[in-house]
Amino acid sequence: MPTLSVNKKPKLLFFVTEDWYFCSHRLPLGIGAREAGYDVAVVTRVNRHGSIIEAAGLRLIQLPLSRGGKNPLTEWRSLLALYRILRRERPDILHNVAMKPVLYGSLAARLARTPHIVNALAGLGHIFADRKRAGGLRAFVKLAFRWLLKGHTRVIVQNPDDLRLLLDVGAINPDQATLIRGSGVNLALFPQQAEPGGTPIVMLAARLLWDKGIREFVEAAKLLHKAGVSARCVVVGEPDSENHSSISAEQMTAWHDTGEIEWWGKRTDMPTVLAQSHIVCLPSYYGEGVPKILLEAASIGRPIVTTDMPGCREAVTEGDNGLLVPARDAGALAAALKMLLNDPTRRKDMGQRGRERAEQEFSEEHVVSQTLDIYRLLLDTAH
């Protein structure tokens, strides 16, 4: 990996809301930037993953910030604290990740006169996907984007649908944007593995949000069982108390107790968990970037059934490494799953193609290299 040819280490600050999210989606990039010669710090709310960030040789700066916070006084205090951090650290580049850090980080960076801003939108989330409930907030975000994203910033999007939307609403100029599909997958951590024996397992692993298609998955499981299809339908994940669309633990337990699905709760050993699957399913209509779980599924060689929605369809070519179904359609989802459950040979072929795509298009190394190119371009332009 090329390193910087400057005497003084440039300062790079990542701003994310949660330490766990940085570890799961951006830690390889932070390590790659450090190895390339940057002084890297992470500004985030610290919960249980701060020691992992520091063990990777990255500085950790605590900033209390709630993803779902709406109290104006609390939010103002968080924004002021971020501004003070930027004034103290004086980074050469501020890399904001996801919606709230992009909005808050861009505003604070303008006030602090941070020279370079990279805004990474990992999908546009429920604000743009939920056209009924989030109309007013969506209009506000569009206006904020038009003011905050234009100018001396670079914007990273994960799928072409999000790129077109941002261009259509006038939030960015074409020369500001870079398309980097997803946050990448560690091919060594998720090696290709043969299917296990036993009753086939269809696995949905995600934050437990209605918008992730959990209800449709449960309904599809009921249809499969009613049709006499032999399968175990498994949900892996935990509720997200800071998201309005979160499903309660009580609801998940109730579904589990009926026997239609199995709820395995939160798991941190995802390579081992995914290896137990035969099909990986994500019937999401959330407003994804490119779901990391789909890249991990492809890497271990599993066929994917997901929705024909922005972000999800970036990881799947219909009939090649998986199947695409309409959003919110439990019947179509059940039919696609039944097709693959009854055809082990096709599952194997799709899984092989998924691994090939992961190697060719979605490796962590590829994502890190593309992002470091953006940093270098910004710094080179400044000199």
Image (spheres, rainbow, N blue to C red):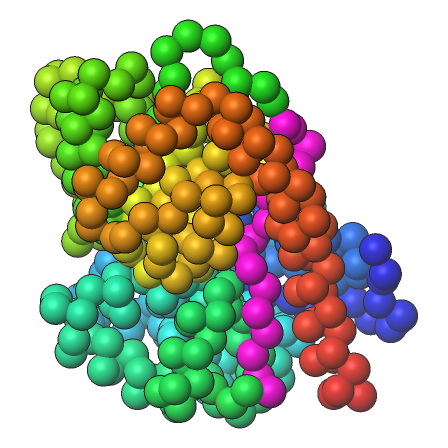
In terms of image quadrants, where is residue 42?
A: bottom right
Residue drawn 75% across the image and 73% down it:
376
| The stretch drawn in magenta includes residue 309 | no
Residue drawn 79% across the image and 58% down it:
36
- Observer-nearest residue: 8 or 248? 248
Q: Is residue 197 shown above or below 85?
A: above
Q: Position of residue 171 (x, y in %)?
A: 41, 86
Q: Position of residue 221 (x, y in %)?
A: 21, 27
Q: In this view, does 362 lie to the left or right of 254?
A: right
Q: Is residue 142 shown above or below 267?
A: below
| The stretch drawn in magenta includes residue 186 | yes
- Observer-nearest residue: 329 or 56? 329
| The N terminus: image quadrant | bottom right
Which residues fall within the magenta stretch?
A: 175-192
How many circles with numbers are drawn on the protein? Answer: 0
Q: In this view, does 239 lie to the left or right of 6?
A: left
Residue drawn 63% across the image and 46% down it:
357
